[in-house]
Image (cartoon, grey):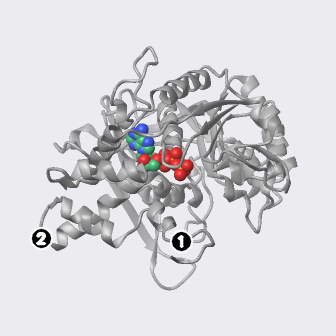
């Protein structure tokens, strides 16, 4: 079997090397927690003509801003917005971050979306501008199409075969693994190298999964679970796929989505896989650990040659910088330069500041704390405050997403609180109130829970007004 004879690394010491994609960076995992407060927002909620629907996709009101964002989505999709910026401005809690996330939903998973917060640039280890540069690289996607020789099918058998370990007296090692693959047309039994078995374990492949193994690299990819094993749950995280057609051994068109940031990182720390990332990795075998400008240029060159050959396509994505007023003049200047580079993603900025000092200048006051030359490159969209009605709708949506039941009058009460202080305060009262309700042995939140919450916690305005002008506690 060709797949079996391709790898010569001993399985006992080599780390699992077959992985079509780099491991998700911990940074992007950590970011999902920022998104949780917005989980009720599914999209911008626009009609096909780009008009805002009344309660579209979890977004209440804010019609102007939503429609404007819809236009930006269209421009990004047709690649007419690269190198420009959208600036979302508005009071705290008016849905700027929510809008940006809705834009990312609209663009779909294939278009890279790289969110960051302005203050992230102040890291003790990395230069400010480097943080920005990396975010921009992560927002440019590369879709690589390749035709590869693969073995594909539903796994019918997965039997590792063990033998004595020649290196140590104890224990056994896997000497090879027998994998049975089935397609509509036939079945085939493969005898595979132990390193491939490691990849199979890493991908958590079980009998009944549909997989493919690349013939000349041994890379294993799980496509999904076979239809035959589909259960009747309404909601499930599993993706079911039909039994593959054709022969087990065939040529298959594979599409891989990576970002320039991924390629930079893979090449900075070459690990020696056999996929596209490390083909490029083999360019630089010096064991370099830092992403330098020179490395980026080398990666760009290879990317360009892939594009010229027609095997790859560049997909410019979006960088979202929340709380952009936290950037300083150095960053803003660099941002201008990045925006003008030939491979620039779309930039979305958000801020809740009005006229304020540009950080790092000391005395220059500018709208939103952003220098005029950058503002010049921005389309500005404003978010409006909410009426009591709209607050009520958002609170109801949030309660549904969090699975909370509300008694009569609670919504009205929270809407009044929201109108008095802020939408966010009203939303934030929900969870603690549900805990109070549970303590009292109820499954519904009642107005008295909200009252009690109000007595326990202060909203910002009340809290501020407890201090007199000189800052002493009144
Ligand atoms: N129009 C809306 N429809 C539904 N939910 C909304 C809407 N506007 C805001 N929200 C929700 O209200 C909360 C606060 O909104 P968000 O975080 O987007 O505010 P923001 O404008 O980014 O505020 P800040 O300036 O403080 O960052 C979030 O949970 C958000 O999902
Ligand atoms: Mg925000």
Instruction: Tell me the tag on residue 441.
Output: 2
**Residue 194 point in image, percent of width and height:** 50, 61
Which residue occupies 74% across, 62% down?
122
* Placement of 467 over or under 231, stated as above or below: below
Say few, some or many: other residues with alpha carbon within 10 Å of mark 1 (under 14 / 14 to 19 / 20 or more).
few
The x, y position of residue 176, in whole percent, is 46, 60
Q: Is residue 369 above or below residue 169?
A: above
Q: Which residue is mark 1?
A: 467
Q: Measured from the top left, where is residue 284 in percent x and y?
A: 81, 52
Residue drawn at x 50%, y 38% as measured from the top left: 99
Give the label, 2 or 1, closer to the camera: 1
Nearer to me, 438 or 216? 438
**Left or right of 112, for residue 47:** left
Q: Secondary structure at mark 1?
A: loop
Mark 2 surroundings within 10 Å by alpha-carbon count, few (fewer than 14), some (14 through 19), many (20 or more)? few
Q: Please determine whether, in this image, residue 83 is positioned above or below residue 397.
A: above
- Residue 220 seen by the camera: no
Identify the residue shown where x is 41% and y is 49%.
Answer: 423
């Amino acid at each position: 079997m060709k797949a079996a004879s391709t790898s010569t690394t001993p399985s006992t010491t080599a780390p699992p090397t077959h992985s079509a994609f780099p491991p998700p960076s911990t940074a992007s995992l950590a970011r999902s927690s920022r998104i949780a407060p917005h989980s009720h927002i599914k999209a911008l909620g626009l009609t096909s003509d780009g008009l805002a629907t009344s309660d579209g996709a979890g977004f209440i009101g804010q019609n102007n801003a939503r429609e404007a964002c819809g236009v930006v989505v269209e421009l990004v999709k047709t690649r007419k917005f690269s190198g420009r910026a959208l600036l979302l401005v508005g009071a705290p809690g008016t849905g700027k971050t929510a809008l940006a996330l809705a834009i990312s939903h609209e663009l779909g998973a294939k278009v890279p979306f790289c969110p960051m917060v302005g203050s992230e640039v102040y890291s003790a280890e990395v230069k400010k501008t480097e943080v920005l540069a990396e975010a921009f690289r992560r927002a440019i996607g590369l879709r690589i199409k390749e035709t590869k020789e693969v073995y594909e099918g539903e796994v019918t058998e997965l039997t590792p075969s063990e033998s004595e370990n020649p290196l140590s007296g104890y224990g056994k090692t896997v000497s090879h693994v027998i994998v049975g693959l089935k397609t509509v047309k036939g079945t085939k039994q493969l005898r595979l190298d132990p390193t491939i078995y490691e990849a199979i374990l890493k991908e958590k492949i079980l009998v009944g999964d549909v997989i493919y193994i690349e013939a000349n690299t041994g890379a294993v990819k799980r496509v999904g679970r076979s239809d035959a094993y589909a259960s009747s749950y309404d909601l499930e995280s599993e993706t079911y796929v039909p039994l593959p057609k054709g022969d087990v051994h065939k040529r298959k068109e594979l599409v891989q989505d990576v970002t320039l940031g991924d390629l930079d990182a893979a090449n900075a720390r070459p690990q020696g896989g056999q996929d596209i990332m490390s083909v490029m990795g083999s360019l630089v075998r010096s064991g370099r650990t830092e992403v330098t400008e020179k490395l980026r240029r080398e990666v760009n060159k290879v990317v360009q040659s892939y594009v010229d050959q027609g095997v790859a396509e560049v997909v410019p994505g979006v960088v979202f910088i929340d709380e952009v007023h936290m950037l300083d003049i150095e960053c803003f200047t660099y941002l201008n330069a990045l925006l003008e580079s030939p491979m620039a993603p779309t930039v979305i900025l958000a801020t809740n500041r009005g006229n304020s000092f540009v950080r790092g200048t000391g005395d220059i006051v500018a709208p939103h704390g952003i220098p005029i030359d950058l503002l010049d490159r921005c389309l500005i969209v404003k978010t409006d405050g909410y009426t009591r009605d709209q607050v009520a709708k958002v609170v109801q949506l949030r309660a549904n997403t969090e699975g909370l039941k509300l008694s009569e009058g609670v919504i009205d009460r929270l809407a009044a609180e929201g109108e008095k202080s802020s939408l966010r305060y009203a939303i934030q009262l929900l969870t603690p109130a549900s805990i109070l309700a549970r303590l009292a042995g109820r499954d519904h939140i009642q107005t008295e829970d909200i009252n009690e919450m109000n007595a326990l916690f202060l909203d910002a305005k009340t809290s501020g007004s407890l201090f007199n002008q000189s800052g002493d506690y009144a």
